[in-house]
Each structure stands twice: as structure tokens, then as C-alpha cells.
Image (cartoon, coloured by chain):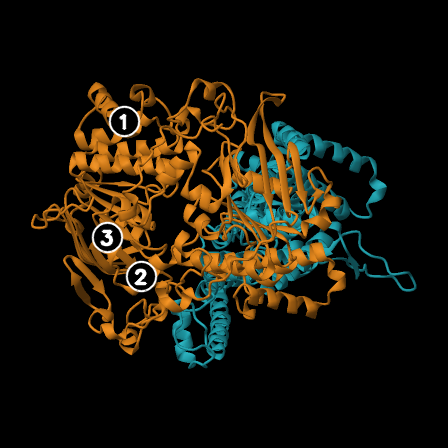
Chain colours: A orange, B cyan
């Protein structure tokens, strides 16, 4: 992966001193300043950064596709020896698609839904290769075959809605390749995809790149993807490139404090039970950039020089450069990282004998599929099909699976936001499935939910105080509480989640994503629940903010003894937080056990594949384990395969797998697998 | 004088009260206040609002009704006229009472058609002659010296413009002084607010458009409105500025009276539409299931009946009811008024479907949002979720639809009156004016001024409403907000 490229050859793309900004209210705010990097043919350059750091805007500027408010403020982009900013628009159109092509994040919206796949590829072929008619058809088939789509001739006449998400992204790549570009700009190409599909797409991109000697500019926030794909890495922070290195150097010895903090904020098993290191404060807004080093306000090592003087590039090794004063004054480095690890000991001595808070037995949630004028039920989507769980106080059960496996539906059915079709849900030994709304109300206090998207889970028209008070009023009865008591309770809650009391009268839009998630947690805690269902509470957040929220959840569990049902697709988070893990596939739990067992020695073939597909941010260790690639995609839960749902994608499938769904098999006291391989 | 409160007056003043309360309430809601402040910054929006305010002033003056006392004989109880007048009528008494015999062109001193005239010669003999007869009121002050008419008109217009300019400059100075006093927290001001400005600096800032409120647009529009109003007022005392219609009534008077009809149709109808559309739309979207089916069935059925046909049937039935119960109404004005209101209700009952469908779609989206589910997880009651979580987040759509529907309804009235199923024939409206113009355009020489005047006023009213709707939509649409 980290093979040495010929550095003497002229780079394919050379960006020097690129600055761009956005106009708002008559003022231009600089979003990116002084960005310089180069991408050679056959090289993958990863531009890494958290949301809002200007990485996508830079990519759009390369293509001269900035939105109307965007302005290029200075700098040059040189592509194959041509100055792109000096080209007339007509020639620029030849460069776009023909010279460099772009793949976007969301495959569902980057294809036109009313045109067939063939038309969309043909459009590029006609423009850049001058091919039409049969020749174009042949070329399009070849392209689809090249991106790994079976039966390309048939797929050409299909519309995007007939394709799955991974297939759409493959088509998008085929469209991008149709112009035979020398540089591929991939803007978070796999962020919207599941890990197994992500692994497929990353493999595909790597193969295509090697085959065609393409340069690739990979824009991502995921250190794992960088580790897997990149030859060289550039880290962006607040519109500036702060560190640039070859991938091996980068992962072995990150030098910039921001990069170090990013690595330290990554949750994994080694830091289990301890606090994750977080980056204090927030990314500065465009309107209020710090004068000196942009990272200085959040940097643990910063001193006066950092606050007044913007650091220049310092060379830290062969091709490794860092924009930090620390390199010239290394003695300034203050030992911080060790202090944080002390605050461990959050491992609650869970009383194993205790009665479980939550017992779910054979839970089923089926959604009817209605067709025709009379809306007759013609089938069922078996979103959840027989799930059993146990959860005791102070413990965390992680429910893991890819999108569409029904894990969120389990959460909502436990909360009775969705009516279960069958099965039982017991809270503290009391059956709650099928209770009426009136009977449920007193029980609602004991279980609450934290939602995935902090931007959608808070009503934008209510103040933070009103949002938090809502639950108390509805469930604890506001008659007992005076306004002053209520205010005090809200202030205490805000303090508990680490927000200051001044937040009460402010509106959600005034807060950042991480702060909003804190508000959402405070809202759930307001009614003093025993069970908290966390539905991917960190998947919409940046790594450094995710660490803050995970720390908060850990602290709350230690101090309040909460039980968490943690729904996620992120294994790093599972490793860090969970005590037990249940892996779901197509509405059923295929493997269940303690986190050490499941993650160290996965037994079910699906768990194995899932774990090996997760890109690890440590490239050296990833080489050891064999990589299992799952073929195909998750089937639809409305029409699951007969027998074991996983058999069409399983390498070990036997005749028995095709016929009968495997029963639960206990491998040990805490370990359950559903697979015919174990008996 | 006996005050009369017509039903439509009641609605109009209730609406004014609701508007005032709404303004006060939204000023206390930071998000709404910010959105309205964005409307205030929009120059076309504020110019349109100024125009609409001028129309609203005319309409409100026309909504204070009374019955004048008849000259009482001694010892008798005071008797009141059967005619219901409004404050506007009182202000326009000269226009209302100086009726010519028939058509006369704008600013004319003679009628539009030739008549057999008997002219007494100096020697006492009477000669019959076909000529344009002199108007009774138009240019009466000129006497026989009709040739002076052009100079007279120009003089009056100039004097009126001078008055308008003075008033306007005074207003501008007032606004500039206000800005100076406030220290102008301008749109993108970097200097600290609250510091008093010199008058000159405030004046410059005002015209540069560097104010948080688009004062320059308001003042420019006010200038134009004042100029037109003053010229009209200056000339209307002596001439028929927009000519007269078939029965010799002043067209300017008719146009001004039409404004109220248009406003009532536009506003009262939305008042009927709104609760229906908002309630049914949100309920259908939130509850889904059979409630949704029922409401959807209702509005698809309603939508599939041709609108004009449905309205025609309803209006005709109502007309029969009104005609068979003359004892319900003390005056003709009351009868016409009730018919106008009934028309509003009929229009309202048939036009809620569009907004309801829009709101249903939005509610379908919102009910899946996580904050609504969070409220459900707290066991908050459905009605409370509707009122607290859904409605405030749909308000921008309601406000946009409200302002946009207004112009559509004003036009609908014109069309319906033209077809003959609109307002009472005795009630002056843009529709009836256009309906009358049907004959006028068919004769030779053509009488063009009635239609032109109605068209120009209606055009300005609807254009202003549309421009304001645009500004409101831009300010409230979350996708447009930065």
C-alpha cells in the first residue's frame, strides 16, 4: 500500500495556495486558505478532516463547481500542466469528467431518478469520448462490468430505483470512469454505505486505480478508510492543511497536536473503561478565526507564540510536514495525555444476580405490505423477527447490524413507539407489550431514548428549557412542581450533561451537534429513567465530539447505574462502551455474547465478515487477519431467503442452510450463535 | 347619525385585532421575529407592503358604517336614512353626489356622446343643434371658458404635487431623525449600536439602504403614492379624473369602493379556509390511518367537482334564500353585505383543499422526526404534540399560503362577478366594474376608462400582494434561510 511512488515525475494535480470563501450578507468569509498539495498519477491522496473544515469545498473548487455564494480568493490549480482557473468555461467542461471526475457521498441523490443507467453513462460517453449508438452501448457495458455489476446489458436499461445503494455507487463510479479521467475526486464515497458494502467499494476503487494508473483525491473523515486507501495524507483543520505525510509515517508518528488528538479520541478496546481523550472547545466559525494558529484555542500545548503567529510549514521527515510551532520548540510539549487516562474505574461491578431491567422474548415487528385499490395485505416486511434480549442495570448491550437489519425497530418496539406484532417486552419483570397508552404512561418514565440525529431530535421552535421540561411535565406531573423547582431541576440536568445554565433560554439552532446531543441526553434523563435506548447517538458527530458524548454516557452509567441498549453499526464504539453484544442480520440476532468473546473470537460467519470489513485506523495490525469479503448485499426483509437468511452470502453454506433456519445454540454461559456450523 | 356594524365590518376589525395580536406575539418569538425582520429588510417586500397599507387604509375607512340622520321635522323622533354610508363615503361626498347624466371621458368638460341641444341665441330664439353637452359638474368652475381647462388642470396638478413633495420631505426627515436617534443598528454594522448619529449621516445611511429596515423602499413608494393621491385629490374636486360610467357615476369613486370588496373577499375567505385547512391537514398527516383516508377522500371529492360549478350552485341557492326573506334585512346594504360574506364562505369552503394537502404532506414528514417521537416516548398527548411540535413548525407554510391565496381570491371575485355569480349587483367591486365594461367595449366610440381604471387598481393590488408573498416566503422558507 505504501509503496514508494516516483516523486520526481511531475504531479498530475498541483494545488498551490488555494483560498476560497463564501459571501454572506455582503461579506466574504474565508473558508479555506493557503491550501497546497499535489497528487501524482497512480497515487491516492487522502484529505482528512472533520465536518466544516473545507475539504469538500476545496474539491468543488478544483472542478470550478463552487455554489453561487462561493468565491475563489486566490491560488492556482494546475492539472496536467494547465492552469484550471485561467481556462474558459468551454474548455473547463472538457476537463470535468474528461480530465478529472467526481464521485459524491450519497449515491441515491447523485443519479437522476428518471433516466436509465445507460442514458446517464451515455451522456458522459457522448461528451468526452464522442461515442453514440451501439459503440456507446458496448462501452457502457464494459464499464459496468469493470465496476463489478453482473449482467450489465440488462442493468443498462434499468432505473436507479431498481438498484441497491452499493450498486448505485458502482454505477456512479462507472459514470465517473466513462470519461476516462486521469484523476478521480471521491468525496466521502462510502460514508452512506454499510461496512460490508464499503469494503467492496473501496476494493473496487483500489483495483480500478491500480489498473488505470489514475490519481485519486479521497476526501474523508474516517481514519480507517484513510489507512486502507491512502498513499499520502493531508489533514485539514478549520480551512488549513495542518499536516501532510506519507500514510505509513502518518499512522506511525502523527506530529500535529490535532492529529494526535484525533487518534486519541478514537474509541477502541485498549481504552475500554477509561475516558477517551477529547479536544476541548469547538472548531472556530468562519467569522471568528483565531489570529495565530487556528488550533491554538483547543491545543493542550499552545503558548503565546501560537496565539499570535500563524505557524509555517516545518519538515518532520521525508515528505512529512507539519504546520506547528512545536516542531521548532519541542520542549514546549506538555505531558497531557497521561493525565486523562487516570479517570478510569468506570467499570461498574455489575451484580450478575440482579433481576434484568429489560427482558425481551421473541419480539416480532411485521409491517404489512398493502397493494391494490382495497389496500389488501399481500405480505409482510419482517423488520424484527423473533429477537430475545436481556439487560441488567448498569450494563450496556450493543445491538449491532447494518442498515435495514431492524435494530432501530427493536429499539422503538421496546419503547412501544411501534406496536410489536408478537412477543413480550418486560420492564422490571412487568409485561409492557400490548398495554394501552394510559397504562403505559407511568412506565414511560423508566425508559427513554436518545436519537441518532441531534439536528432532528430537538424541536427548533422550543427553547432548551421547554424541551427538557416537556418530559417532566408529561410524566412526573407538573402540579407537584413549582416553576422555581422546575428551573432548578433543569439547571441540575444541564450541569449533569456538561452544559451551562445559560442554555435554558436559548434555541437548539444556537448549539453545535455535540451540544445538541447533550441536550437530548438531558431531556431523556429528566424523567430519571432506568433504561436508556441510544439509537446511534454518535453517528452524526465528528470523532472528537463522539468521544465527548461517549465519555458522558460512560460517566452517567457509572454514577446513575443506567442500563443502555446501544444501537449502532460502529464497532469501535461497541468495543469501547458495551459489555455485551448482539449482532443482528435481517431481523434476527445471529450471535450474542460478551464484548470480549464476540469481538475477539467471532463465531458466526456474518460477524466474522462484518468485523473484517471494518477498516482499521491501524494499517499495520490489519494485515494480520484474513479479509473476508461478503458478496452481494443484504436481501430485502420483505422477502428473506429461505432457510438461514445469510446463506446466499455465506462461504460455508450447506444444503441444510438453504432449508432450515438454525436454532439458537449456546456455546458457553453467555454465548449464543444461530448457525448450523455449530452443534 | 346611527353607527351600523355590518357583518363584514365585524370580520374586518376582528382581523385587524388578530393582526395586531399576531404582530405582538411574533415579536416575542425570536425565530418569528427574525423571519419578519428578514421581510423588513427586503426592499420589494416593503415597497409592496407600503402599497398594501395604502389600500388597507382605504378599505378600513370604508368599513366604518353609519346611517346619516335625516333632517328631522320639529317634535318628531329622529329618523335615519335608509342609505348606509361609510366614513370613506363621507370623505368622498363630492365624488359620490356629483353625478353626470351618462358617460364622460376622464378630465372632460363635455359629455362623451352628442345630444340634441336647445341653444338659446342672443336674440332670444332657440336653435336646435346636435353637440356634446356641457357636463353639470366636470369643470364647472371654468364657466364658459372651457379653453382654459388644460391650464387649469396642469395648475391644480402642480399645486397638488408641491403639497405631496412637502409632506413627503417632512416624512423623510422624520424617519431620518428616528434613525439618527436610534443610532441605527444597521444590517451589517460593525460599530457599536446605540451611538446617536448626526442627522446628515443618518440621511445618507437611509438612502444608501444601510438600515435594518428597508426605509428607502418604503419612502420611495410612499412618495409615489402621495404624489398620485394628491394629484387625484387636487383634480377630483373639479373634474372626473377617471371619467364617469353609464349612469354618470364617478369612476374614481367606484374604484375606491371596490378596494374594500376585494380586501373582504381576500381576507375573510382565508379566515374560513385557514382553520379547516390547518386542522384537517395536520390531523390527516399526523394520525394517518382511517382519519387520513377520510380527509383525503373528502378533499379529492371536493377537488374533482368543477370549482366554478360548485360555487355557482351554492351562490344561486343562497340568492334564493336571501330573496325570499327580505324581512331579514333593514337596508339594501345589509343584504349586499350578507351576500358578500356568503360568497366568502362558499369560496373558503371550496378552496381549503390545496393548503390542507400541503400541510398533510409536511405533517407526514414531521411526524417521523425524532423530536415528535421523543414527545411520544414521554407520553405527551396527541393534541399537545399537534399544537406544540407540529403547528409551530408548519407556520411558515401557512403564512406563505395565506399571502399567496389573497391575490388569487381577489382575482377569483372578479371572474365570478363577471360570470354573474359574484357579489350583489348593487355592490361595487372590481368584478362588477369589469362586467359592466363588457358593453362599454362593444360600443363605438369605445368607453375604455372604466375597465382601465379597474384593471390598473386591481393589478397594483394583486402585484403588491404577490411581491409581499414572495418576500414573506423567502424570509420564512427554512431552505432559503442562511
Q: Quadrant of residue B365?
A: top right
- Marks 1 and 3, how far apart at CA: 30 Å
Chain letter of the residue carrying label 1: A
Note whether A494 is above or below A12 in the view shown.
below
Which numbered tag is attached to residue A461? none
Residue A233 is labelled as: 3
On the question of residue A108 being in view, the answer is no
Q: Secondary structure at mark 2?
A: helix
Determine whether A122 is above or below A24 in the image. Answer: above
Numbered tag placed on residue A260 in the rendering: 2
Q: Please state the horizontal and vertical placement of residue A80, each as a whole percent of the image.
A: 12, 45
Task: Please tell me which residue is depicted at 61% across the width and 27% down the height of the picture.
Answer: B304
Is B280 drawn above or below residue A86 in the view shown?
above
Helix, strand or loop for disc 3: strand
SS type, badge 1 = helix
Mark 1 Cα within 10 Å, few/some/many (few <14, many 20+)? many
Q: Nearer the viewer, residue A235 or B157?
A: A235
* Nearest to viewer (mark 1 / mark 3): 3
Label 2 chain ID: A
Q: Residue at x 58, y 35 (%)?
A: A387
**Which sits earlier in the primary sequence, circle 1 or circle 3?**
1
Residue A10 visible? The answer is: yes
| Residue B469 pos. (x, y %) | 51, 50
Amino acid at each position: 500500500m505504501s509503496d514508494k511512488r516516483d516523486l520526481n515525475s511531475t504531479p498530475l494535480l498541483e494545488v498551490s495556495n488555494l483560498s476560497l470563501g463564501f459571501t454572506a450578507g455582503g461579506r466574504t468569509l474565508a473558508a479555506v486558505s493557503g491550501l497546497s498539495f499535489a497528487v501524482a498519477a497512480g497515487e491516492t491522496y487522502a484529505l482528512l478532516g472533520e465536518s466544516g473544515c473545507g475539504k469538500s469545498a476545496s474539491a468543488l473548487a478544483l472542478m470550478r463547481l463552487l455554489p453561487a455564494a462561493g468565491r475563489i480568493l486566490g491560488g492556482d490549480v494546475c492539472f496536467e500542466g494547465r492552469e484550471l482557473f485561467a481556462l474558459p468555461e468551454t474548455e473547463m467542461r472538457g476537463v470535468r469528467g474528461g480530465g478529472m471526475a467526481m464521485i459524491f457521498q450519497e449515491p441515491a441523490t447523485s443519479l437522476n431518478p428518471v433516466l436509465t443507467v445507460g442514458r446517464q453513462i451515455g451522456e458522459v460517453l457522448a461528451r468526452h469520448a464522442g461515442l453514440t449508438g451501439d459503440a456507446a452501448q458496448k462501452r457502457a457495458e464494459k464499464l459496468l462490468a469493470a465496476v463489478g455489476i453482473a449482467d450489465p446489458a440488462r442493468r443498462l436499461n434499468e432505473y436507479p430505483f431498481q438498484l441497491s445503494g452499493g450498486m448505485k455507487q458502482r454505477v456512479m463510479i462507472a459514470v465517473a470512469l466513462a470519461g476516462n479521467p486521469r484523476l478521480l475526486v471521491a468525496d466521502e464515497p462510502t460514508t452512506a454505505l454499510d461496512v460490508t458494502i464499503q469494503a467492496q467499494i473501496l476494493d473496487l476503487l483500489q483495483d480500478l486505480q491500480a489498473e488505470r494508473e489514475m490519481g485519486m483525491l479521497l476526501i474523508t473523515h474516517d481514519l480507517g478508510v484513510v489507512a486502507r486507501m491512502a498513499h499520502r495524507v493531508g489533514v485539514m483543520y478549520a480551512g488549513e492543511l495542518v499536516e501532510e505525510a506519507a500514510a505509513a509515517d502518518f499512522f506511525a508518528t502523527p506530529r500535529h497536536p490535532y492529529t494526535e488528538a484525533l487518534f486519541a479520541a478514537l474509541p477502541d478496546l485498549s481504552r475500554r473503561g477509561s475516558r477517551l481523550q477529547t479536544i476541548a472547545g469547538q472548531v472556530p466559525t468562519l467569522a471568528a478565526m483565531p489570529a495565530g494558529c487556528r488550533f491554538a484555542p483547543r491545543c493542550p500545548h499552545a503558548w503565546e507564540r501560537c496565539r499570535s503567529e500563524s505557524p509555517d510549514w516545518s519538515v518532520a521527515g521525508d515528505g512529512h510536514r507539519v504546520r506547528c510551532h512545536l516542531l521548532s520548540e519541542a520542549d514546549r510539549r506538555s505531558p497531557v495525555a497521561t493525565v486523562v487516562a487516570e479517570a478510569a474505574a468506570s467499570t461498574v461491578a455489575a451484580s450478575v444476580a440482579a433481576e434484568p431491567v429489560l427482558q425481551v422474548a421473541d419480539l416480532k415487528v411485521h409491517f404489512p405490505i398493502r397493494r391494490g385499490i382495497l389496500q389488501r395485505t399481500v405480505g409482510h416486511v419482517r423488520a424484527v423477527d423473533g429477537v430475545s434480549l436481556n439487560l441488567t442495570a448498569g450494563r450496556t448491550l450493543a445491538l449491532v447490524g447494518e442498515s435495514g437489519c431492524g435494530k432501530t425497530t427493536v429499539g422503538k418496539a421496546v419503547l412501544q413507539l411501534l406496536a410489536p406484532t408478537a412477543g413480550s417486552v418486560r420492564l422490571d419483570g412487568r409485561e409492557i407489550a400490548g398495554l394501552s397508552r394510559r397504562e403505559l404512561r407511568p412506565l414511560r418514565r423508566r425508559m427513554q431514548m436518545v436519537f441518532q440525529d441531534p439536528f432532528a431530535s430537538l424541536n427548533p421552535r422550543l427553547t432548551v428549557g421547554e424541551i427538557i421540561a416537556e418530559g417532566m411535565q408529561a410524566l412526573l406531573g407538573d402540579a407537584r412542581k413549582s416553576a422555581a423547582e422546575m428551573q432548578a431541576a433543569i439547571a441540575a440536568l444541564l450541569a449533569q450533561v456538561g452544559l451551562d445554565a445559560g442554555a435554558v433560554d436559548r434555541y437548539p439552532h444556537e448549539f453545535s451537534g455535540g451540544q445538541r446531543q447533550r441536550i437530548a441526553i438531558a431531556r431523556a434523563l429528566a424523567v430519571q429513567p432506568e433504561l436508556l435506548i441510544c439509537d446511534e447517538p454518535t453517528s452524526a458527530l465528528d470523532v472528537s465530539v463522539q468521544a465527548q458524548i461517549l465519555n458522558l454516557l460512560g460517566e452517567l452509567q457509572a454514577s446513575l447505574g443506567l442500563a443502555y441498549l446501544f444501537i449502532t453499526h460502529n464497532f469501535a464504539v461497541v468495543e469501547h462502551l458495551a459489555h455485551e453484544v448482539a449482532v443482528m442480520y435481517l431481523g434476527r440476532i445471529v450471535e450474542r455474547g460478551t464484548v470480549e468473546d464476540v469481538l475477539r473470537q467471532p463465531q458466526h460467519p456474518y460477524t466474522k465478515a462484518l468485523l473484517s470489513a471494518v477498516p482499521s485506523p491501524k494499517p499495520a495490525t490489519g494485515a494480520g487477519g484474513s479479509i473476508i469479503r461478503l458478496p452481494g448485499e443484504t436481501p430485502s426483509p420483505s422477502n428473506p431467503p429461505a432457510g438461514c437468511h445469510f446463506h446466499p452470502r455465506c462461504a460455508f453454506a450447506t444444503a441444510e442452510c438453504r432449508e432450515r433456519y438454525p436454532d439458537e445454540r449456546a456455546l458457553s454461559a453467555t454465548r449464543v450463535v444461530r448457525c448450523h456450523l455449530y452443534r | 347619525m346611527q353607527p351600523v356594524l355590518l357583518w363584514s365590518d365585524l370580520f374586518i376589525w376582528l382581523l385587524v385585532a388578530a393582526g395586531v395580536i399576531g404582530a405582538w406575539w411574533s415579536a416575542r418569538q425570536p425565530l418569528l421575529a427574525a423571519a419578519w425582520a428578514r421581510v423588513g429588510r427586503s426592499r420589494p417586500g416593503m415597497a409592496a407592503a407600503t402599497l398594501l397599507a395604502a389600500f388597507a387604509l382605504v378599505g378600513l375607512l370604508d368599513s366604518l358604517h353609519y346611517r346619516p340622520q335625516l333632517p328631522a321635522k320639529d317634535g318628531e323622533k329622529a329618523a335615519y336614512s335608509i342609505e348606509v354610508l361609510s366614513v370613506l363615503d363621507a370623505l368622498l361626498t363630492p365624488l359620490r353626489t356629483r353625478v353626470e347624466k351618462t358617460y364622460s371621458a376622464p378630465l372632460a368638460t363635455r359629455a362623451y356622446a352628442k345630444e340634441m341641444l336647445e341653444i338659446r341665441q342672443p336674440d332670444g330664439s332657440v336653435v336646435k343643434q346636435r353637440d356634446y353637452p356641457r357636463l353639470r359638474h366636470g369643470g364647472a368652475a371654468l364657466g364658459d371658458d372651457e379653453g382654459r381647462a388644460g391650464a387649469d388642470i396642469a395648475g391644480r396638478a402642480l399645486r397638488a404635487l408641491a403639497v405631496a413633495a412637502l409632506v413627503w420631505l417632512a416624512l423623510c426627515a422624520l424617519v431620518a431623525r428616528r434613525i439618527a436617534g436610534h443610532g441605527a443598528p444597521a444590517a451589517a454594522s460593525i460599530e457599536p449600536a446605540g451611538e446617536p448619529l448626526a442627522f446628515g449621516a443618518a440621511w445618507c445611511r437611509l438612502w444608501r439602504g444601510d438600515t435594518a429596515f428597508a426605509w428607502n423602499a418604503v419612502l420611495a413608494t410612499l412618495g409615489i403614492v402621495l404624489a398620485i393621491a394628491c394629484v387625484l385629490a387636487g383634480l377630483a374636486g373639479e373634474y372626473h379624473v377617471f371619467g364617469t360610467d353609464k349612469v354618470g357615476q364617478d369612476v374614481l369613486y367606484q374604484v375606491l369602493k371596490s378596494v374594500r370588496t376585494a380586501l373582504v373577499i381576500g381576507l375573510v375567505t382565508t379566515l374560513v379556509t385557514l382553520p379547516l385547512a390547518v386542522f384537517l391537514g395536520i390531523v390527516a398527516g399526523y394520525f394517518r390511518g382511517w382519519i387520513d383516508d377520510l380527509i383525503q377522500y373528502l378533499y379529492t371529492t371536493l377537488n374533482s367537482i368543477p370549482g366554478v360549478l360548485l360555487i355557482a350552485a351554492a351562490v344561486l341557492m343562497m340568492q334564493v334564500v336571501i330573496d325570499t326573506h327580505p324581512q331579514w334585512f333593514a337596508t339594501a346594504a345589509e343584504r349586499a353585505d350578507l351576500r358578500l360574506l356568503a360568497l366568502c364562505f362558499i369560496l373558503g369552503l371550496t378552496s381549503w383543499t390545496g393548503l390542507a394537502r400541503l400541510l398533510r404532506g409536511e405533517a407526514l414528514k414531521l411526524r417521523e422526526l425524532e423530536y415528535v417521537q421523543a414527545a411520544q416516548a414521554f407520553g405527551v398527548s396527541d393534541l399537545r404534540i399537534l399544537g406544540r411540535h407540529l403547528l409551530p413548525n408548519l407556520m411558515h407554510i401557512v403564512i406563505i399560503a395565506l399571502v399567496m391565496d389573497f391575490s388569487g381570491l381577489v382575482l377569483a371575485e372578479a371572474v365570478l362577478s363577471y360570470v354573474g355569480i359574484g357579489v350583489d349587483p348593487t355592490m361595487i367591486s372590481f368584478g362588477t366594474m369589469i362586467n359592466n365594461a363588457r358593453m362599454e367595449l362593444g360600443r363605438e366610440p369605445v368607453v375604455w376608462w372604466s375597465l382601465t381604471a379597474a384593471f390598473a387598481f386591481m393589478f397594483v393590488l394583486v402585484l403588491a400582494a404577490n411581491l409581499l408573498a414572495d418576500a414573506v416566503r423567502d424570509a420564512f422558507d427554512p431552505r432559503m434561510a442562511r
